[in-house]
Amino acid sequence: MASDQNFVDFVTEQIQNVGIISTKKMFGEYGIYSDGKLFGVICNNKLFIKPTIQGRSFIGNPTELPAYDGAKPSFLIEEKIEDRKWLSQLVKITLQNLPEPKAKKKKK
């Protein structure tokens, strides 16, 4: 089941003051970015945030599941998804602790 645009819009509206939030449609689901850095995905109308040690500490006892078959486990955000301040803080923590994206190789 693909995510619907209303849910994607809701999630992006919940995240405040963490850069320019954007989404990119990928195989019927969405990657979610801040200033071009991928920090999570939206799959089946559920938000998954990339795991970090600091994010785990902030959440306390996160639910970790793969967003789709073959994916690595991520933090599933359900109960606090409507808490803008909490969600924004989690995204800030995550972004600070993810490596910078690798530069794309130029095509010949």
Image (cartoon, helix red, strand yellow):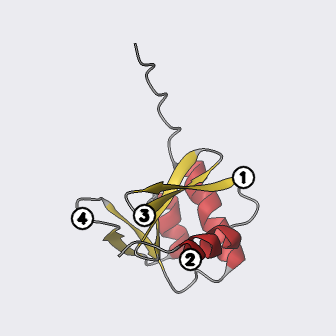
Q: Which residue is mark 3?
A: 29
Q: CA distance from mark 2 to mark 4?
A: 21 Å
Give the structural element (helix, strand or loop) at label 3. strand
Look at label 1 and name its amino acid: Gly
Give the structural element (helix, strand or loop) at label 4. loop
Whether residues under marks 2 and 4 lie with C-beta atoms below 8 angstroms apart, the answer is no
How dense is the environment of label 1, judged by Cα within 10 Å: few (below 14), some, or many (20 and up)? Answer: few
**Front label number (1 vs 3):** 3
How dense is the environment of label 2, judged by Cα within 10 Å: few (below 14), some, or many (20 and up)? Answer: some
Instruction: Classify residue 10 by image quadrant.
Output: bottom right
Q: CA distance from mark 3 to mark 2?
A: 11 Å
Look at label 2 and name its amino acid: Phe
Q: Residue at x 47, y 61 (%)?
A: 30
Closer to us: 73 or 52: 73
Give whichever of discs 4 and 3 has the lower sequence position.
3
**Front label number (4 vs 1):** 4
Closer to us: 93 or 74: 74
How dense is the environment of label 4, judged by Cα within 10 Å: few (below 14), some, or many (20 and up)? Answer: few
**Front label number (2 vs 4):** 2
**Circle number at residue 19:** 1
Q: Residue at x 66, y 82 (%)?
A: 83
Q: Position of residue 70 (x, y in %)?
A: 23, 59
Look at label 3 and name its amino acid: Glu
**Circle number at residue 7:** 2
Vertical comparison of 45 with 68: above or below: below
Q: Which residue is mark 4?
A: 69
Q: CA distance from mark 2 to mark 1?
A: 20 Å
Give whichever of discs 3 and 2 has the lower sequence position.
2
Could you tell me which quadrant the C terminus lies in?
Answer: top left
Q: Residue at x 40, y 63 (%)?
A: 28
